[in-house]
Amino acid sequence: MVLWKMKFKIWEKEEYTLIHFDLEEVIEPKKLKDLEPPKVNLKKGVVLSGRGPIWLYCYLTHHYHPARFIATYDPRLGGAVVVETHDPNIYVGQVIEMKI
């Protein structure tokens, strides 16, 4: 999907869906009202990855709130840090090991 020079790539894993985004130009906050994030299976977790402003990550985290958990990928840690969870077996601050 391309929207104002933003591309989403999706990788389905057993426990989560990795949503990676690429921005090809500087975006403006007012564009959020037109953003249509990809639909995913919310029974699994969601891992967000990409270089973008904090407010974009906040928007995407809110959008995917019903998911089993939400994590953000950090290459320095070699995984994704859980920032929100509805699963008692997964905790905020947990690092899910993964390679992108």
Image (cartoon, grey):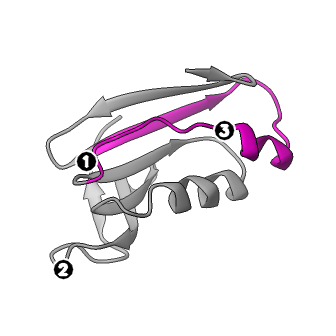
Amino acid type of the residue that numbered disc 2 sits on in the rendered structure: Pro
Q: Nearer the viewer, residue 1 or 91?
A: 1
| Residue 78 visible in the shown view | no
Amino acid type of the residue that numbered disc 3 sits on in the rendered structure: Leu
Q: Which mark is residue 88?
A: 2
Q: Secondary structure at mark 1?
A: strand
Q: Nearer the viewer, residue 8 or 24?
A: 8
Picture coordinates of residue 16, whole percent (x, y): 25, 47
Judged left or right of residue 68, residue 83 is: right
Judged left or right of residue 66, residue 12 is: left
Picture coordinates of residue 78, whole percent (x, y): 35, 50
Residue ID for mark 3: 35
Q: Which mark is residue 91?
A: none
The quarter of the image holding the C terminus is top left
The quarter of the image holding the N terminus is top right
Q: Tell me what residue is drawn at x 43 percent, y 38 percent.
A: 19
Q: Tell me what residue is drawn at x 69 percent, y 58 percent.
A: 54
Reply yes or no: does residue 35 show up in magenta: yes
Please provide the residue range marked out in magenta. 17-42
Name the mark nearer the viewer: 3 or 2.
Answer: 3
Asked which quadrant contains residue 41, the reply is: top left
Q: Which mark is residue 16?
A: 1
Amino acid type of the residue that numbered disc 1 sits on in the rendered structure: Tyr
**Labels 1 & 2 near each other (Cβ < 8 A):** no
Does label 3 or label 2 sit earlier along the sequence? 3
Judged left or right of residue 89, residue 66 is: right
